[in-house]
Image: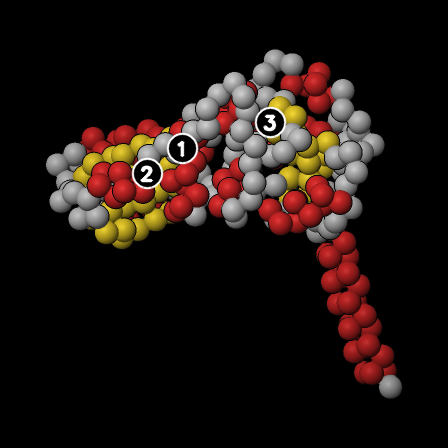
Amino acid sequence: MKNILLKLNAVTMILLFTLALASCQNTPGKGGKVSVDEFENLLTSTKNAQLIDVRTGDEFESGHLKNATNININAGDFDQKVNALDKSKPVFVYCLSGGRSSSAAGFMRKNGFKIVYEMPGIMAWRSAGKELVTGNTAPAKSGMTMEEYNKLVTNEKFVLVDFSAVWCQPCKRLSPILDKISAERKDKMILLKMDADENPDLLKQKGIDGIPYLELYKNGKLIWKHQGFIDEQTLLSETKL
């Protein structure tokens, strides 16, 4: 009987631990990072939702979610504009690939906002084929076509493509590493830098939903790819450059 009770207590502890762990995860009604589909569903079902785009004005005008308000996280009045929102109501925040919106959401939570939802970003939204609205002050950007891109990466040398953006911190850390490798191996490789903000259609066609994003080609054939920051040693080890 004693052994049975000990086993039951052990099972009970496991169940309690599992329930406690689950309660710490992001769940609807508590905010947190959600998928594109969850973000859209929650946004649609929330009356008078506060939808905030924290990118630059130019980025916003080139394509944004319907009914979004642009509050540039890098602008001097960001804190003031955010604190003017209703902290008791849910806030939906996004940027291009999730970095700036994560920082914005963290600021909001520290300043008393009860529910803040974060989306992976415009890149993931566009990749999922969802609707964007274009502003009136700037034409929609499309950038390089897939045909043009394929021509650029077709070369006897290795072609290393770096999809990045000027505001992306991991991209800034990665850039000098790529420049160094390119300079040291200029006889065997070409470094091609692609601005994610300037080439939204290309990113959508390629299914890229996060930056930095790297691709390595040889004679037009994709032989390696990587999303996120990578150190020099790992990059060289994986690519054999």
Q: How is the image coloured?
A: secondary structure
> Residue at the spot x=21%, y=48% of the render?
220
| SS at circle 3 | loop
Tag 2 residue: 145
- Separation of marks 3 and 2 at Cα, in angstroms: 27 Å
Q: Position of residue 18 (x, y in %)?
A: 74, 62
Front residue (pair 182, 231): 182
| SS at circle 2 | loop
Residue 142 circle label: 1
Q: Are marks 2 and 1 in contact (CB under 8 Å)?
A: yes
- 50 over 207 or under it: above or below: above
Tag 3 residue: 54
Q: Are marks 3 and 2 in contact (CB under 8 Å)?
A: no
- 46 over 222 or under it: above or below: above
Q: Left of 112 or right of it: where is 162? A: left
Query: Viewer-nearest of labels 3 and 2?
Result: 2
Type of amino acid at the residue the image marks with label 2:
Thr
Residue at the limit of the structure toward the front, as seen here: 136
Type of amino acid at the residue the image marks with label 1:
Ser
The quarter of the picture where the N terminus appears is bottom right
- Separation of marks 1 and 3 at Cα, in angstroms: 21 Å
Front residue (pair 136, 153): 136
Is residue 109 at all visible to an observer of this figure? no
- Separation of marks 2 and 1 at Cα, in angstroms: 8 Å
Q: Left of 141 or right of it: where is 85? A: right
> Which of the two discs, 3 and 2, labels the residue nearer the N terminus?
3
| SS at circle 1 | loop
> Which of the two discs, 1 and 3, labels the residue nearer the N terminus?
3
Which class describes the residues within 10 Å of circle 2: few (<14), some (14-19), or many (20+)? some
> Residue at the spot x=52%, y=46% of the render?
129
- 9 over 141 or under it: above or below: below
